[in-house]
Amino acid sequence: MSRSGARLARESVTIAHMVRLYCRRHHGRALCADCRQLTDYAQERLKRCPFQDGKTTCARCPVHCYRPEMRERVRTVMRYAGPRMIYHHPYLALRHLLDGRRKRPVRSSVREV
Ligand SMILES: [Zn+2]
């Protein structure tokens, strides 16, 4: 059994860092309104993730829970911030790599929103 919430808490911190990296470079802000909205949306998706601590990284997830528009936005952020995380937040980047290596999750319950 996993420590409850640890996995998701890490994912949530990771995505927040990635959006901030992206925003600082592309919008010249610490976190503009649009990027804050994207972060909030991602956090909300994580909270409702049917896999919870059993989840893999979102890029590998078999369930596409993002709205298409938000999915596109988060992918743009990941493309930019993903490779840069290793310089800015090496520990999180490493953990994210390892988390992506776990086997595909088994869905315990479906909570469509
Ligand atoms: Zn921004």
Image (cartoon, rainbow, N blue to C red):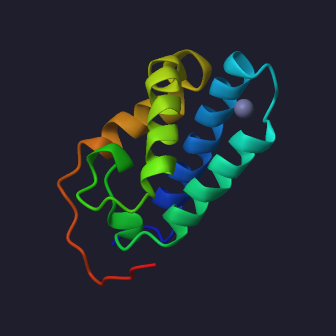
Q: Is residue 103 left or right of residue 54?
A: left
Image spot of residue 43 (x, y percent): 59, 59
Is 72 situated above or below 12? above
Q: Nearer the viewer, residue 7 or 50?
A: 50
From the viewer's perspective, tell me whether residue 13 is left or right of residue 112.
right
Which residue is found at the position 39% from the left and 80% from the top? 112
Q: Which of the four quarters of the rendered structure image does ligand 1 lie in?
A: top right
31 relative to 8, above or below: above
Residue 41 vs 90, above or below: the answer is below
Drawn side of residue 88 relative to residue 113, left or right: right
What is the residue that sits farthest to the front in this orientation?
A: 69
Number of marks present in the image shown: 0
Residue at 44 percent across and 47 percent down: it is: 71
Q: Quadrant of the N terminus?
A: bottom left
Q: Percent position (x, y) of residue 58?
A: 37, 49
Q: Which of 17 and 30 is in front in this view?
A: 30
Residue at 44% x, 36% y is 75
The residue under the point 61% across, 20% down is 88
Q: Position of residue 73 (x, y in %)?
A: 52, 39
Q: Nearer the viewer, residue 112 or 90?
A: 112
Give x and y (percent) for residue 64: 32, 58
Question: In this picture, is 57 found above or below 4?
Answer: above
